[in-house]
Image: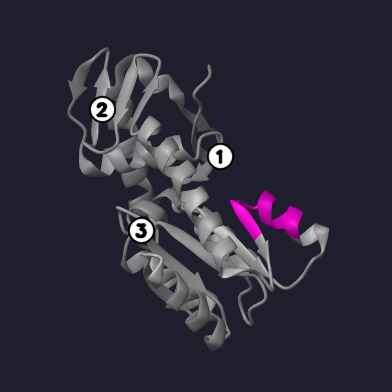
Amino acid sequence: MKEQMHILIVDDESDMLELIGSFLKRQGFHITTANNGMDALRQLEKEPIDLVVLDIMMPDMDGFEVCQRIRQTSQIPILFLTARGYEEDRIRGLEIGADDYIMKPFSLRELAARIETTLRRIRGLSLKRSRIQIGDMEIDQDGRQVYIQQEPINVTRREFDLLMFLLLNQGQVFSREQLYQKLWESHSTSGSLRTVDTHIKTLRLKLKGAERHIKTVWGIGYKFEEEE
């Protein structure tokens, strides 16, 4: 591969980690490993990862829970590994956000092919979506710039992060507590909740007509809706 992609492999079996990791390194991937769910979540916070290979059957925190935790903040592609062949498990995995599913025992060449196919698909979507157009509003994700009717709008780093978080999770309602904890990475207090409200207010003012996409759900919080 011309571009070295970073893969996180999560499995509680050290032999499996070594086997998969060694093979994928030979295929040109950069590899990070984790032997439990909490370690995997810490690795994702520490460094950029392009795809997660995630075992389902792990103690303490299984792959389903890890996937759900990841999906709270990220759309990184996830490929499940499992020795369980139950259809219900496969359906559940896909419903909570897995991109693909491979059964143990499996061919390492098949695993590498699945990874490359998933990455090609995701990279194609990312390129298409690096600039997002919603009505009069255009967002350049790479340049972290917002345009209204092709005119650049001066938004702060926090306002941009807030807008993108709501947009990428559009339709989902987030309380002020959730927004503060996710974007400010701290526990909320009565004062911090007012900080969220203030940022929403200033962001709406800057977005002019496009502020209608940020909806207040009374008594709960805020959400982003593309359609009126």
Contact between labelled residues 1 and 2, with CB atoms less than 8 Å apart: no
Determine crowd level at label 3: few under 14, some 14-19, many 20+ residues with C-alpha closer than 10 A. some
| Element at label 1 | loop
Label located before the other in sequence (2 or 1): 2
Q: Which residues are magenta?
A: 90-101
The amino acid at mark 2 is Val
In the rendered view of the protein, which quadrant contains the N terminus? bottom left
Residue 73 at what x, y percent from top left?
46, 53
- Which residue, given by chain and number where applicable, does mark 1 sit on? 172
Image quarter of residue 138: top left
* Residue 43, disc: none
Q: Earlier in the sequence, mark 1 or mark 3?
A: 3
Element carrying mark 3: loop
Q: In front: 15, or 78? A: 15
Which label lies toward us, 2 or 1? 2
Above or below, comparing residue 43 to residue 193 in the picture: below
Q: Amino acid at mark 3?
A: Met
Q: Is residue 127 left or right of residue 107?
A: left
Q: Label 1 vs label 3: CA separation?
A: 30 Å
Residue 96 among magenta residues: yes
Q: Is residue 98 visible?
A: no
Badge 2, how many Cα within 10 Å: few under 14, some, many 20+?
A: many
Residue in the foreground of this view, choosing between 134 and 107: 107
Residue name at image x 39 percent, y 32 percent: 129
Secondary structure of the residue carrying numbered label 2:
strand
**Location of mark 2 (residue):** 146
CB under 8 Å between callouts 1 and 3? no
Q: Amino acid at mark 1?
A: Gln
Residue 155 in sight here: yes
